Image (spheres, grey):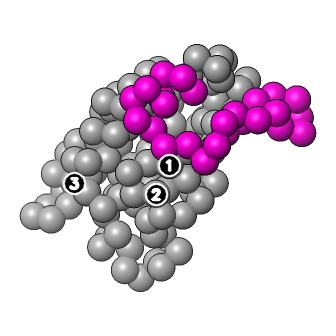
Amino acid sequence: MISHIHATTVVVSDQDKGIQFYRDVLGWELTDDVPMGPNMRWVTVAPTGAQTRIALSLPSWYTTKPSLEMGINTGIAFSTPDMKSTFAELTKRGVKFKGEPEMMPWGKLGVWFFDPDNNEFFMAET
């Protein structure tokens, strides 16, 4: 049976720039960086200890799938046990947020943020 999601894709303009943001700014691990031919690399990143990874893919890989593009709301949500300190630290590191964390209808803090390619993510306090 299926045990977990292996990876989901985020389209980036430059994989090295993506690695720099997710690893060096968000503090995640580079989990894969493997050549897959002359113009392709399989690059994944993930929070420390996470099973699910984010594949950083180039738009040229999806020319037949126009729904995969940069600068969109990805529908991907991350969790943090301490919104205030995480928000403060990521703000200090230069992460662009849509606004301040706000109380969500389910009673926890939430906030939206962007990567360097304007891909939008949600972060919720858990």
Q: From the image, tell me which residue sits under label 3.
A: 41
Please state the extent of the stretch shown in magenta in the rendering: 87-111
Q: Callout 3, which amino acid?
A: Arg
Q: Given contact means CB atoms under 8 Å apart, are the residues at marks 2 and 1 in contact? A: yes
Label 2: few (<14), some or many (≥20) within 10 Å?
A: some
User: Number of marks in the image?
Assistant: 3
Q: From the image, tell me which residue sits under label 1.
A: 114
Q: CA distance from mark 1 to mark 3?
A: 23 Å
Q: From the image, tell me which residue sits under label 2.
A: 118
| Residue 43, visible in the rendered structure | no
Label 3: few (<14), some or many (≥20) within 10 Å?
A: some
x, y percent for residue 96: 49, 43
Label 3 secondary element: strand
Q: Nearer the viewer, residue 53 or 113?
A: 113
Label 2 secondary element: loop
Q: Given contact means CB atoms under 8 Å apart, are the residues at marks 1 and 3 in contact? A: no
Q: Is residue 95 magenta?
A: yes
Q: CA distance from mark 2 to mark 1?
A: 5 Å
